[in-house]
Amino acid sequence: MKWNSNEIAEAIKTAIVKNTLRGRDKYGKEFKLYSTKPFAIPYGAVHNKSKLKQATDTKTKKQGKVNYWKKTSTKGMWITWLDSGYKGYKKTMFGNSKPNLWATGGMIKSFTRLKVIEKGDSGATYNIKTNFGEFKIPIPQEVHITLGWTDKEKAKIAYYNKMKGRDMFGLPQKYLENVVNNMLKK
């Protein structure tokens, strides 16, 4: 394999996404669970209206699981999940309450490789054997990889999740080393 910093950056990005979808943070630990404290959301902000209708039927309201109310200042309808909080909302709307940061897929889809910069020549080479002989591939002294979000709103959601104990932006050192080593073996 020819040293390709862009391919390595893409492999690292893919590993971060897979780690996130498994519900793991940048340290390899499970994401902090969603809150079960009462959670209110404006009716208009709910993505899936058919699931909302099922979740907020008269029976559910009588059981004290949800409550509807109008905000006096805006006259807008709000819904509160009383017994299960944000965790209950996530389960109702997306079928899963285990945090993996994939509610609509938008945040993960806009996470990408933004920039890759190679600096200097390390003097080191990577030896590769092929049917045509053995080659020494030069390795840069430094590789700076910038990953992030192309959508500013999705970046804000990622930051919010980080503040709530769900930091997806990174990998445990051993995972990172495995990704790079596997790329070099190709």
Image: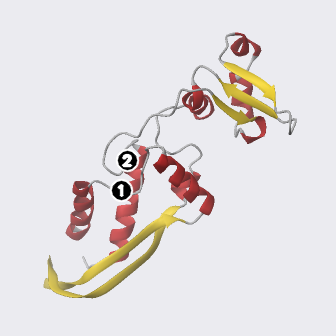
Residue 57, image x and y in percent?
A: 74, 18
Indicate which label's residue lies in the foreground, 1 or 2: 2
- The numbered disc on residue 1 is none
- Residue at screen point 72% across, 10% down: 62
Q: Label 1: how many residues lie within 10 Å, few (<14), some (14-19) or many (20+)?
A: some
Q: How far separated are the C-alphas under marks 1 and 2?
A: 12 Å
Taking depth in this image into account, of 26 and 175 the one nearest to the observer is 26
Tell me which corner region of the image, top left, top right, bottom left or bottom right, holds residue 73: top right
**Residue picked out by circle 2:** 25
Q: Secondary structure at mark 2?
A: loop
Tell me which corner region of the image, top left, top right, bottom left or bottom right, holds residue 124: bottom left
User: Is residue 94 positioned above or below 137 on the image?
Assistant: above
Residue 182, image x and y in percent?
A: 23, 63
Amino acid beneath label 2: Asp
- Residue at screen point 28% across, 53% down: 172
Q: Viewed as shown, does residue 101 lie left or right of 154?
A: left
**Residue picked out by circle 1:** 15
Taking depth in this image into account, of 23 and 80 the one nearest to the observer is 80
Q: Viewed as shown, does residue 23 lie left or right of 49?
A: left
Q: Secondary structure at mark 1?
A: helix
Residue 158, image x and y in percent?
A: 52, 53
Is residue 4 visible in the rendered image? The answer is: no
Amino acid beneath label 1: Ala
- Residue at screen point 69% across, 15% down: 60
- Residue at screen point 69% across, 27% down: 80
User: Is residue 50 positioned above or below 185 on the image?
Assistant: above
Residue at the outermost front position: 73
User: Is residue 126 positioned above or below 78 on the image?
Assistant: below
